[in-house]
Amino acid sequence: MSPKAAPLPRFSLRANTLPDACVTHTPDHPLLLDIGLLARRAGDAIMAIYREDFDVEMKSDHSPLTAADLAAQKVIVAGLAELDPVLPVVSEEASQLPWQERHAWSRYWLVDPLDGTREFVKRNGEFTVNIALIENGKPVLGVVLAPVTEELFAAARGYGAWWQVQRDAEWERISTRELANPPVAAGSRSHGGSSELTLRRLLGEEFQLHALGSSLKFCLIARGSADVYLRRGPTSEWDTAAAQCVLEEAGGAVLDLNGVPLHYNRGESLLNPEFLAVGDAGIDWAARLREAGLP
């Protein structure tokens, strides 16, 4: 299958108004800036393929694979090796080491070189590069790049969450908002499972649904432009880690359906439990989840 090249879509999160509390300066974290530049290099490799015709293969789990996934993987793995040749890397596009070896890791990289390959194939612009640093099961650094718009979201534990509207633009500090009335629920563009009935139980009858691809849903919440993202159905650890760091540093949370923060390197399987990403972490979401009949 070879989708024909088409004009680049104009999808952007920029149309959403920034919270008043945002300030402009630069993250005081050299590694975060280095990983942001690495994500941009991977994004350049993706866009070189996105602008042309490309073939699509299907992996054993029936998810699509393109040359862009592999090109970004090559750039990221090489770049991370330059920064620290010893630190392990777990990535969607690489064979995974067995749990017997991974369980001893206290620190490693967790990467999705092209999150939202289905959106890439559709050419709607809603795909990302995700790079996270995991320490003791928690994402402590995360970078999410939208290659089409050049928007870069970045965060490190204790350094806040940041947004760069395009390459070489000023950095802006971002934060979540209190639960809006009516609330806005971010939903998956290509995967079902966020039941409207369940969302009504969580949020009330009057909520708005905003469909969006890849980890951009988390970023929409981190930017204070949406309130929740309920994921019913499978995701992998590399799908969520980088964006979870961004959302947490912006003031939000990513919780399993028992209300416990999502953590990583849990066992042999690299699949996440179902989860709820929220912007207003001051609400007792665990109680709301129980009242909604979840898990």
Image (cartoon, helix red, strand yellow):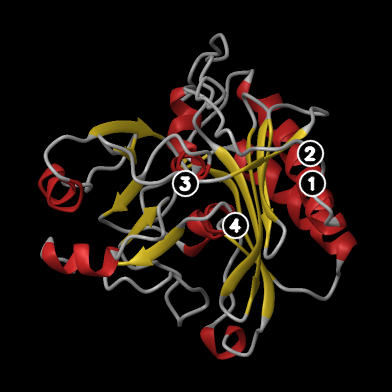
Q: Is residue 2 above or below residue 153?
A: above
Split into 4 quadrants, where in the image is the N terminus? top left
Mark 4, residue position:
249
Residue at 48% across, 39% down: 224
Tell me which label, 1 or 4, sits earlier in the chain. Answer: 1
Q: What residue would you read off at disc 1?
A: 38
Q: Quadrant of residue 108?
A: bottom right
* Nearest to viewer (mark 4 / mark 3): 4
| Relative image position of residue 3 (x, y in whole percent) | 48, 20
Query: Is 251 situated above or below 22?
Result: below
Number of numbered labels in the structure image: 4
In front: label 1 or label 3: 3
CA neighbours of label 3 inside 10 A, class few (<14), some (14 to 19), many (20+) = many
The residue mark sitting in front, 1 or 4, is 4
Residue that mark 3 sits on: 218
Crowd rating for badge 1 (residues with CA inside 10 Å; few <14, some 14–19, many 20+) = many
Q: Residue at x 79, y 27 (%)?
A: 169
Disc 4 residue crowd, few under 14, some 14–19, many 20+, Cα 10 Å: many
Helix, strand, or loop for circle 3?
A: helix
Q: Which element is circle 4 on? A: helix
Q: Label 4 to label 2, Cα distance in Å?
A: 24 Å
Q: For the view shown, which residue lies furthest in the front direction?
A: 20
The amino acid sitting under disc 4 is: Glu
Question: Please, what is the three-letter code of the amino acid marked with disc 1?
Answer: Leu
Classify mark 2: residues with Cα within 10 Å, few (<14), some (14-19) or many (20+).
some
Say which of 242 and 109 sits in front.
Answer: 242
Q: Quadrant of the C terminus?
A: bottom left
The CA span between labels 1 and 3 is 21 Å
Calculate the distance from the C-alpha at mark 2 to the C-alpha at mark 3. Answer: 22 Å
Tag 2 residue:
41
- Three-letter code, disc 3: Phe
Tell me whether circle 4 and circle 2 mark residues in contact (CB < 8 Å): no
